[in-house]
Amino acid sequence: MSAEMPDTARCLGCGYLLRGLTGTFCPECGRRFDPADPTTYGPRRRWRLAGPPSRWECLAIGALTISGLVGASGPARWESQMSCSGACAAVPLWAGLVVVYAVRLVAVLRDAGRAEGTLEDEQRTRSLRWVVLPLCVLLILSSLLYSWPLMVRFHLNRPAFEAAVKEFEAGEFTAGQWVGLYHVNRATRRFPAERPKMVFFETGSSLTYPFGFEYDPNPGHPPGRSVIRVAPSWYTYEE
């Protein structure tokens, strides 16, 4: 009688394929089934989360990652601290996404690892959505070890800053404008006597201190609280 069962008939206990069996007990887990009663068998019930991360989960992970990397691309530690504070506030959301990801992965690997796993099970394990969370976590961790978001963002905007230096020297630079992807509040010379060629581009300020980028082709850049050489003659600065 089991030969008359549909090809998709599976044990409700473990998901073993039942078609073609000579008995009425599942050889995998021992659960009884009746070939004449479809309610005693059926397509295996999958977990609700047995699948790759949803599109909305991937979008949430991407948004959190971009927000953190943008904060890390600023020229001041104050911006980085604010970014870290925002990341801490998002910890519950990150934790929830990681837990859901783990549950999905366990469920899909459980299904695909069975001898009777279907092509659909294999496709679930090969979805590119599985790489979104690990990749984003690696990006966030790498930004903590090395300030590559700052380097990338500045180098993308370096031609605009080079042009801004020429405008400043010609007296044509106006405050409160965008220089590439950075908004510059003002441009000044902090040490006109000691370092006549230095130009300070203020991109923001904390409660009391301005910060931004300095163009200084003079030898020996003076130390500061947050000085990073981002390119030849270019430094970050925070008073």
Image (spheres, rainbow, N blue to C red):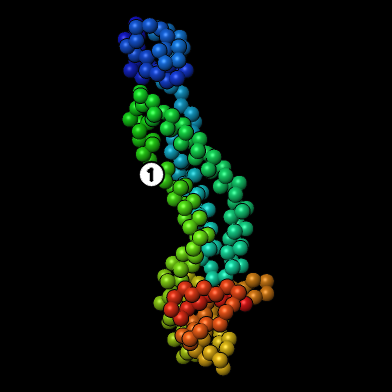
Residue 120 image position (x, y, % from top left): 35, 31
Q: Quadrant of the N terminus?
A: top left
Q: Residue furthest front?
A: 220
Reply above or below: 78 against 37. Answer: below
Nearer to me, 237 or 86: 237
Q: Residue at x 46, y 41 (%)?
A: 54
Residue 80 image position (x, y, % from top left): 58, 64
Q: Residue at x 39, y 35 (%)?
A: 124
Q: Residue furthest bottom?
A: 193
Q: Is residue 62 visible?
A: no
Nearer to me, 52 or 171: 52
Q: Residue at x 51, y 60 (%)?
A: 145
In the picture, measured across the screen, residue 207 lies left or right of residue 34, that is: right
Residue 84 image position (x, y, % from top left): 59, 59
Q: Residue at x 46, y 68 (%)?
A: 151
Task: Characterize the local packing of mark 1: few (<14), some (14-19) or many (20 or more) Cα atoms within 10 angstroms.
Answer: few
Nearer to me, 239 or 153: 239
- Secondary structure at numbered mark 1: helix
Q: Which residue is mark 1?
A: 128
Q: Quadrant of the C terminus?
A: bottom right
Residue 101 image position (x, y, % from top left): 49, 40
Amino acid on which the number 1 mark rests in the picture = Leu
In the picture, measured across the screen, residue 94 lies left or right of residue 163, that is: right
In the picture, measured across the screen, residue 120 lies left or right of residue 50, that is: left
Reply above or below: 176 against 2. Answer: below
